[in-house]
Image (spheres, rainbow, N blue to C red):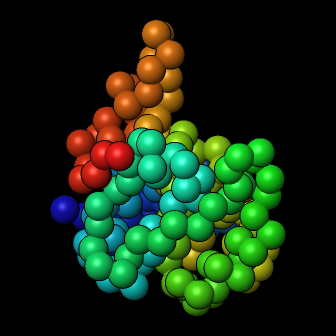
Amino acid sequence: MSTLEQLYAQAGKRRVENQLPYAGAISPAEAFELLQLDPRTRLVDVRTRAELDWVGRPVIGDGQYAHIEWTRYPGGVPNPEFLDQLGKVATPDTPVLFLCRSAARSKLAAIAATQAGFTQAFDLLEGFEGDKDGQGHRKTVSGWCFRGLPWIGA
């Protein structure tokens, strides 16, 4: 198991290497370790309610998981209350790990949070389901589920 310092250093290294406009990027396994090591850390799932209902969600410590839609379903309309809702589950110095299906919306959420003053906003690489394989299926090449981390299905 890594230390908090090692996990944050790795995330910061990715920030520098990729010129990320937020605190850093963290792998699913690193995120799971960080959540175990620091109970202040929040995993904010930015997928739609429909995605949670149809696909499932991570299982982590009490009070560490929050669901805040980045876009609404149906229609993909941006959630105008996103930052207000984030402020109800985290303070500006809380480590926040943003998760979506394949790590696209999570990047946007990390940028928005950083611009709003959240200093510990991280993108969770690979997302919950990860990239598609050659047959167009997810959960087979990358992501939280593929990495064998705890989750509950729909």
The residue depicted at 80 percent of the width and 69 percent of the height is 80
Residue 14 in view of the camera: no
Q: Is residue 106 rendered to the left or right of residue 148? A: right
Q: Decide: is 92 above or below 30.
A: below
Please name the residue shown 68% across and 50% down the image: 73
Residue 9 placed where, x, y %?
45, 65
Give the vertical position of 53 relative to 93 (above or below): above
Quarter holding residue 133: top left
Residue sitting at x 38%, y 31%: 139
Whole-percent x, y for residue 128 in the image: 44, 45
**Which residue appears farthest toward the top when viewing the image?**
135
Relative to 147, residue 40 above or below: below
Let me know if residue 41 appears in the view. Answer: yes
Q: Position of residue 97 (x, y in %)?
A: 50, 65
Which residue is depicted at the point 71% across and 82% down? 84
Q: Position of residue 59 (x, y in %)?
A: 29, 61
State the image quarter where residue 2 is shown: bottom left
In depth, the one of 128 and 94 nearer the eye is 128
Q: Quadrant of the N terminus?
A: bottom left
Side of 62 where 107 appears, left or right: right
| Front position in the image: 114 or 23 | 114
Name, please, the residue furthest toward the left: 1
